[in-house]
Amino acid sequence: MEQDVAIEPVMAKPAQRIRWTANGRRLIKLLSIFLIIVVGLVLRLNPLSDWAEHPELALYEGEPILTTFDGYYYLGLARDLLEGRYTAVNENRIVPDYPMRPQPVPLMSAVAAGVAGVTGWSLNWVAALLPAVLGILLALPVFAIGRFYGGAFMGLSAALLVLVSPYYVNRSSVGWFDTDCLLVTLLMTMIYCFLQFAVKETRSRYGYLAAGLTTYLLMMWWWDQTPQVVTVLASAALALATLFFYRPKASGEWWWFVAIVGVCMAVVLYWQGIGFPAGIFRSVAGNFLYISKSTGSLFPNTGASVGEQIQYPLFVVMKMTTGHPIILLLAVAGLLWLLVQKPKESLFLAIPVGLSVLALAFASRFLIYVAPVVALGIAYLATQVWRMGSHSIALTFAAPALVFAALIPGYQQILKIERFPQENPSLIDGMVAAEKLTPENAVVWAWWDHGYPMAYWSRRGTINDGQVHSGERSAYTALPLVSSSPRLSANFMQFFVARGISGVHEFYQAVGGKPEDSYELMLRILFDGPEKGRALLQSAMASFENPSKSVNEWLTFFYPEDGRPVYLYLDWRLTKIAYWWFWLGSWDIERQEGIHPFYRVALGVTSNDGVLKNRRGLVVDLEKGNVQLNNAVIPFLSFTNLEDDEQGTQFFQPGEGGEGAVADYLPSKNLLVIAEPVIAHSVFNRLFTGQLGNNPYFEIVKDQMPAYRLLKVRGDQLAHEDLSS
């Protein structure tokens, strides 16, 4: 019988793999990181091409305008530092309360001043370019964290993804001179250091502990306005490291931990004061009330009116942060996979994840923390696919394809981002005019979002800004605009600039009783003027609970002679946000509500055969007494050609329910205002449209409407007989 012969299959020899040396692999990683950083920098500098093409939207006399209002706070401090005017008291903010300048100088201001001082570059250009340079640094800690969780491929993938995150690109691009551009980088660096402290078992872990606490101090210096929040974040990361990982083998090792943490705590207490720990809860609770839009007082929470505090729907958040909902879902899948594979180590990501959840629940500004979370989630998912590639060549290519596919929606979203400053050059021109046309000690009354830019460009005093815009202060800021009485508006501005919010509270305390009664009495005294105000005070003081002044002293209190000159800055932006400032200025303390009015200003309106039109679809039919606007027909109550005295005002029958709008037309400016009566009769609208013109209480200093109008405010002055008994 023939014996079967086993035949060994002939197999092709696998191709020799290229074996890189350690230095070669290191060089490839460095080149990859360099290319990733270049991509991130190009994306952040890209708006400069639009600025060069449309300088009328971004540059003022060749100098860039920041794309965020708050940036001028830090830029102003940097200029003070360069000019040797960084004194203890800032006399051009929150007049007359005059806050202290922060000590030490905020790190962002110090860096900008340092770069400008060393290079000789314009401070405005330094501030515009610095965010783009600092923003790309986020790639480094994200790469390090990604490499820890999944190797070099994950680290590089995460670094690339994080620099193409749309919302983070927006808030770390050219012009966005605010803390966002380095804040996430410092947080992720701190997390990485504490993660390394947790997992290492040699004494090198204490180097990471020291590095993490040093980063915490830098982050506190960078995010100078909320050191308590930074402390909570650092404490959370350190707590994770100590509770779940830190088990020193040698008994003496505890002293390393105690010594390093003790030195850090001593620095914090010396810097922030001995009462700093006690104020942490109060500060965090206050910030939570603000972002959650809870009222918490007699006045409304202004967080509801701030763009970056808006709570967006989940679908919108997905678009803003990743470009497409599927990308976010894939990132969540990757994070869950990471949690299963590395349950303890992945706990450190709970910190940026928690901050990201705040964006969904309360305020969009926290969306900057979504960038590293999504990047690490997608990168880990791609890494797992990459590792499966050892069994399938298709999966080897699928992993990088997944990463690049995740970049496309984000890049497309970046192209849709607004690339020009919110303060356009025409508005800046009004602020510069205030410097030229007002005394050095003047105060310019402007809405709070202009507070920092106004103080920077005009070098004049302001009464409200992005750091102190409480509901109460903002209600008082809007009150002169909302009022229908020029006298009340001028008198209130004159009073508030001299006495401030502390003066208002002093009067409330003297009157006692319900706050709404004190508020109304204060307004009546200022509305009536000194002569009638005296009689009103005499009758009202009998019921004062704490009458700390005489009638004459109260009159001098309300009609001060020693206040700084006051000017009013009206601008185009006020027409766009009237919905909010009118709500604040009309706030009823007792009923806890304000008025959201309808207010629209149409430009390019021309008249042809009695029909008014513009290119945006507005059509006014004076025969029917209505206007077609945005596919809606709005009935008129009245129509006034403000430049035709003979024509006068045309009145119309109100619509159903008595509804209707007041229309004011300025043919010389091709401008039509359509507004509800409550705001149409306000001092703001009558000054904006020129109906008041020069009058005893307001004098036009410079008129560039509809861009801006600068007016001198003239409140009532006390006469000698007003003080006679």
Image: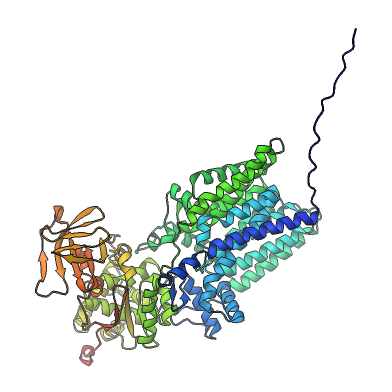
What's the coloring here?
rainbow
- Image point 39% across, 84% down: which residue? 435
Q: Nearer the viewer, residue 543 or 524?
A: 524
Count of numbered circles on the image: 0
Q: Residue furthest top?
A: 1
Residue 302 percent across, percent down from the top left: 38, 63
Q: Residue furthest bottom?
A: 720
Residue 514 is at least partly visible in this image: no
Residue 228 percent across, percent down from the top left: 55, 64
Is 198 situated above or below 54? above
Q: Nearer the viewer, residue 381 or 58?
A: 58
Is 412 situated above or below 297? above
- Image point 65% across, 37% down: which residue? 394
Residue 242 percent across, percent down from the top left: 69, 54
Quadrant, the N terminus: top right
Q: Quadrant of residue 625?
A: bottom left
Q: Quadrant of residue 31?
A: bottom right
- Image point 40% across, 88% down: which residue? 440
Give the left or right position of residue 515, taking residue 406 as reference.
Answer: left
Give the left or right position of residue 642, taking residue 406 as reference.
Answer: left
Residue 703 percent across, percent down from the top left: 29, 79
Quadrant, the C terminus: bottom left
Is 11 situated above or below 79? above
Q: Nearer the viewer, residue 522 or 712?
A: 712
Residue 216 is at least partly visible in this image: yes
